[in-house]
């Protein structure tokens, strides 16, 4: 049985724009947080932060990430499942979408585990979280740009 026509399965503009805004803002706040935590030196010996804005950036990331998680769940139900079952969808798009789902699960689980694990395991989990997040950003961009224009 053929799937729905391509015009029925494309994401709506507002949903697509909201997804891009949340993905980019989560990526920017996550990468900024990592830069501040691991690459900057503390301002003084008694500082808990390496940068005055580090706490704000971390709080913003922790605020945005659950919103993005909810949105990605909606996108998975509305967009990805329909593409997955459509015979006209290219195998490359299905593979990149599958990779995105695997990375989303890794990011969500590692983000939750970071709150419960202390040093040194917590540092390993934060690296896994960061690498998975960066890969998600790259694959998300490639997945979005792989759509056939026409």
Image (spheres, rainbow, N blue to C red):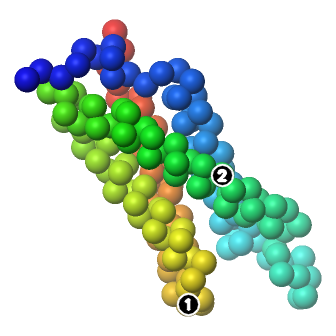
Q: Quadrant of residue 38?
A: bottom right
| In the image, farthest residue toward the left | 1
Residue 102, position as x, y percentages in the image: 34, 56
Residue indicated by mark 2: 64
Callout 1 crowding tier (Cα within 10 Å): few <14, some 14–19, many ≥20:
few
> Residue 82: in sight, yes or no?
yes
Q: Nearer the viewer, mark 1 or mark 2?
A: 2
Answer whether labels 1 and 2 touch (C-beta < 8 Å): no
Residue 95, position as x, y percentages in the image: 24, 43
Residue 64, position as x, y percentages in the image: 66, 52
Residue closer to the observer: 47 or 71? 71
Q: Quadrant of residue 118?
A: bottom right
Residue closer to the observer: 51 or 1? 1
> Residue 138: in sight, yes or no?
no
Q: CA distance from mark 1 to mark 2?
A: 26 Å
Q: Residue at x 33, y 37 (%)?
A: 80
Q: Is residue 35 above or below residue 67?
A: below
Q: Residue at x 55, y 90 (%)?
A: 120
Specify the label residue 133 is tagged with: none
Callout 2 crowding tier (Cα within 10 Å): few <14, some 14–19, many ≥20:
some
Q: Residue at x 37, y 49 (%)?
A: 100
Residue indicated by mark 1: 120
**Position of 86 compared to 56: left or right?**
left
SS under mark 1: loop
Residue closer to the observer: 68 or 40? 68
Q: Is residue 27 above or below residue 56?
A: above
Quarter of the image with the N terminus in it: top left
**Position of 67 compared to 81: left or right?**
right
Reading the chain from its start, which is encountered first: label 1 or label 2?
Answer: 2
Quarter of the image with the C terminus in it: top left
Q: Residue at x 56, y 76 (%)?
A: 114
Q: Is residue 98 above or below residue 8?
A: below
């Amino acid at each position: 049985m053929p799937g729905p026509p391509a015009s029925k399965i494309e994401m709506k503009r507002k949903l697509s724009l909201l997804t891009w805004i949340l993905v980019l803002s989560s990526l920017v706040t996550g990468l900024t947080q990592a830069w501040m935590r691991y690459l900057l030196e503390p301002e003084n010996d008694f500082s808990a932060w390496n940068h005055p804005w580090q706490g704000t950036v971390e709080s913003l990331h922790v605020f945005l990430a659950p919103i993005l998680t909810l949105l990605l769940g909606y996108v998975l139900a509305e967009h990805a499942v329909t593409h997955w079952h459509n015979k006209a969808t290219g195998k490359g798009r299905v593979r990149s979408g599958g990779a995105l789902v695997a990375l989303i699960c890794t990011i969500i689980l590692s983000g939750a585990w970071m709150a419960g694990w202390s040093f040194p395991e917590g540092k390993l989990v934060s690296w896994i979280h960061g690498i998975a997040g960066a890969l998600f950003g790259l694959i998300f961009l490639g997945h979005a740009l792989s759509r056939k224009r026409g």
